[in-house]
Image: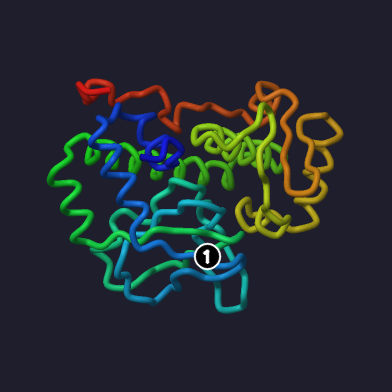
């Protein structure tokens, strides 16, 4: 069993899983593996969904596009993230899943998911928590675009992404991979490319972030949280499903 399975690392923030649960999840994400290059759509709006995708490496996003080419990024997917847990009830996709970097992902069929949820109660509970967090993140993004200033919303997004990377062990101290383009940040925050550039420069000038190459450094995460009006509660990382813990370690 891989100790670095990002799906296990993430789900264990909600519920302690047994050794058997972890083995099942490890097997699940090593079946039907696919790899796509960056800036490639994985599933397009209008396609008939056939499998649940789990990102195992790389960065992806969910987006919708207007007819004139304007794009709104609705969420970012990091390693361990499930793309649309309820995808099997859809007749067709109402959004597009796209790889921002080279991405590896596992495909889970309806039968595979039903087998796991029927035989592993704690995994089922953890998936419910994961769905709750995904909805909470979506609500926070709505608040971000609707009410926060440009600097606040950018700082908030950077805090969120850093903490989510931290959960799956993909940070090194106060640094993490950060492959997003300014156009990605613009489409996620509702700002123009010019405004994104100006906002990042302001965050740099205040020594709140360092962006160099494809790496983000946050010198003082608490200062960045304060600038963002960031409250971590919506990520539900305090092991709130502890009453569902496995007896086995």
Helix, strand or loop at label 1? It is strand
Given residues 229 and 212, the one toward you in this image is 212
Q: Is residue 37 left or right of residue 107?
A: right
Given residues 120 and 130, the one toward you in this image is 120
Q: Is residue 102 left or right of residue 245?
A: right
Q: Is residue 214 left or right of residue 101?
A: right
x, y percentage for residue 202? 82, 38
Q: Residue furthest left?
A: 118
Q: Assess disc 1: are there few (<14), some (14-19) or many (≥20) residues with their C-alpha within 10 Å of its C-alpha.
A: many
Task: Give the image quarter of residue 59.
Answer: bottom right
Q: Residue furthest right?
A: 205
Seen at 30% across and 44% down, the residue is 25
Q: Residue furthest front?
A: 1
Which part of the image, by quadrant, shows the N terminus? Answer: top left
Given residues 44 and 117, the one toward you in this image is 117
Seen at 17% across and 54% down, the residue is 114
x, y percentage for residue 96? 47, 67
Vertically, is 67 above or below 128? below
x, y percentage for residue 119? 13, 43
Which part of the image, by quadrant, shows the C terminus? Answer: top left
Residue at numbered disc 1: 98
Task: Give the image quarter of residue 40.
Answer: bottom right
x, y percentage for residue 72? 57, 61
Seen at 42% across and 27% down, the residue is 237
Vertically, is 108 above or below 218? below
Vertically, is 57 above or below 47? above
């Amino acid at each position: 069993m891989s100790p670095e399975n990002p799906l296990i690392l993430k789900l264990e923030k909600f519920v302690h899983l047994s050794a058997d649960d972890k083995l099942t999840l490890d097997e699940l994400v090593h079946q039907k593996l696919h790899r796509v290059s960056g800036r490639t759509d994985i599933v397009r709006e209008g396609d008939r969904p056939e499998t649940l995708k789990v990102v195992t490496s790389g960065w992806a996003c969910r987006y919708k596009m207007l007819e004139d080419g304007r794009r709104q990024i609705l969420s970012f997917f990091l390693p361990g993230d499930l793309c649309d847990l309820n995808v099997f009830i859809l007749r067709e996709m109402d959004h597009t899943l796209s790889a921002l970097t080279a991405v590896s992902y596992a495909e889970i069929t309806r039968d595979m998911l039903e087998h796991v949820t029927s035989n592993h109660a704690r995994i089922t509970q953890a998936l419910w928590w994961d769905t709750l967090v995904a909805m909470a993140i979506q609500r926070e993004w709505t608040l971000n675009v609707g009410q926060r200033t440009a600097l606040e919303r950018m700082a908030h997004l950077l805090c969120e992404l850093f903490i989510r990377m931290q959960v799956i062990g993909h940070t090194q101290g106060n640094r993490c991979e950060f492959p997003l383009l300014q156009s990605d940040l613009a489409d996620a925050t509702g700002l123009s490319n010019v405004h994104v550039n100006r906002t990042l420069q302001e965050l740099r000038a205040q020594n709140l972030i360092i962006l160099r190459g494809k790496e983000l450094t946050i010198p003082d995460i608490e200062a960045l949280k304060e600038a963002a009006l960031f409250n971590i509660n919506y990520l539900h990382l305090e092991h709130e499903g502890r009453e569902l813990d496995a007896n086995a370690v």
